Amino acid sequence: MEYEYEEFDLRPFIELMLKQWKFIVGTAVGFAVVALIIAKLMPSSYQATALLAETDPQAKIQLDPNANIVAAVNGGNIPTYISIATSDDALQQLLNSINPPLDGVVTLADMRKLVEAKTDKNSQIVELSVTYADPGRTAEVVNLWAAQSITDVHAFYSGQNDQQLAFLEEQLATTLISQEETTVELVDFQSNNSASVVTNKLNALNTAQVKYLKQQNELTRLMGSITALRVQLGKQSGPLSAAEQLTILVLNTQVFDAQNDFTIQLQANAESEISEIGRAEQIAQLDALIATIDSQQAQIEEDLDALPPQILVLQEEKQSIEAELNSLMQKQNLLNETVSVLSRKVEEERIASQNVDSGIRLVSKAAVPEEPENSSTLVSIILAAIIGGMLSVGYVFARDWWQVEE
């Protein structure tokens, strides 16, 4: 598929504009002259600018190097300063303080048309500008505005410090009361603290339990020895030998020792004489000894069964006492630390509130402007010339088209 292209020739239009260039230029110049005349007829306006600069904090207060609290005196920021300077209250106060009043400036809206506050990005400079017909009054007003803005900024941050100080003092007073109450509560608790008594009882029961277990093991061992000896005596006949009689005596002594807290020591030598006892009588004594051990073991078992409930009760009571004591101690420590931190913070705020600087200062007063503002006049003339040129070109094209149609 072939496409057909239509050529558009601009040469006739350019030739037409060149033929009518005098008319086009004349019209543009005429519009510019009219704009200049209008600008001259309008009253001249002058602009004066005062410069304010944000100052770095004069002091950074840290009463305790271990406390993560630093109070910066006179801190601030540029957007806040501009907002304070251009607030309704500030401009109304400025309007009321101008004496004699400016001609044609009666309301707050009129005042807003004259003033401008701005700053560059990441800059610490605030530019306060006033535009008015009288150059002397212009410089007077902008310097008055700058001085008032410094006072207003200081009043704003000073009021913040006073409010913060009052809040911290109230918190400190409340914390001191809580600290005193906790101290009294802790003293009352310690006056009735039975932790030592409970601990002693618990230690006594644990000692008794260890003792019973030791006796139980010893009696079990003796029971085995006596049973073995009885079996041996039952298998033999005739009178007992000296060694067997001595063994029986030692076992009796060990059983006695296991039942008591002291030990009986036996001393025997080769010349000692042991009375002869019948085998049946000796077996009967061993049976009696076994019965005694059984009775003793039953008693120990009963005593051991009674100990765990008592131990558990005392352990629970001890843990409860320790938990309550730890809770009171932690509460007191926390309150002590809070009082310490609040005390330092109160001192820091008192120092900050006593500072008379505002964190912003005047860098440059505005001088009386010598030349009126002409940037707007020049822009108006250029725009008028451009508009006149465009209208004349449009008129030339329209007239040529109309003549061709006829």
Image (cartoon, helix red, strand yellow):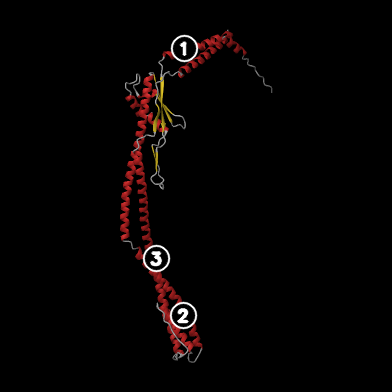
Where disc 3 sits, the SS reads: helix
Image quadrant of residue 255?
bottom left
Element at badge 1?
helix
Q: Which residue is mark 2?
A: 223
Q: Amino acid at mark 3?
A: Leu
Q: Where is residue 55? Give x, y as percent.
A: 41, 34
Residue 364 higher or lower than 189, as above or below: above
Task: For the C terminus, give its image quadrant.
Answer: top right
- Quarter of the view holding residue 3: top right
Circle 2 Cα neighbour tier, 10 Å, few/some/many (<14 / 14–19 / ≥20): some
Kind of residue at disc 2:
Met
Label 3 environment density (alpha carbons within 10 Å; few <14, some 14–19, many ≥20): few
Q: Residue at x 45, y 83 (%)?
A: 250
Residue placed most toward the observer, 313 or 268: 268
Nearest to N terminus: mark 2 or mark 3: 2
C-alpha separation, residue under disc 3 versus residue under disc 1 = 108 Å
Q: Is residue 30 visible?
A: yes
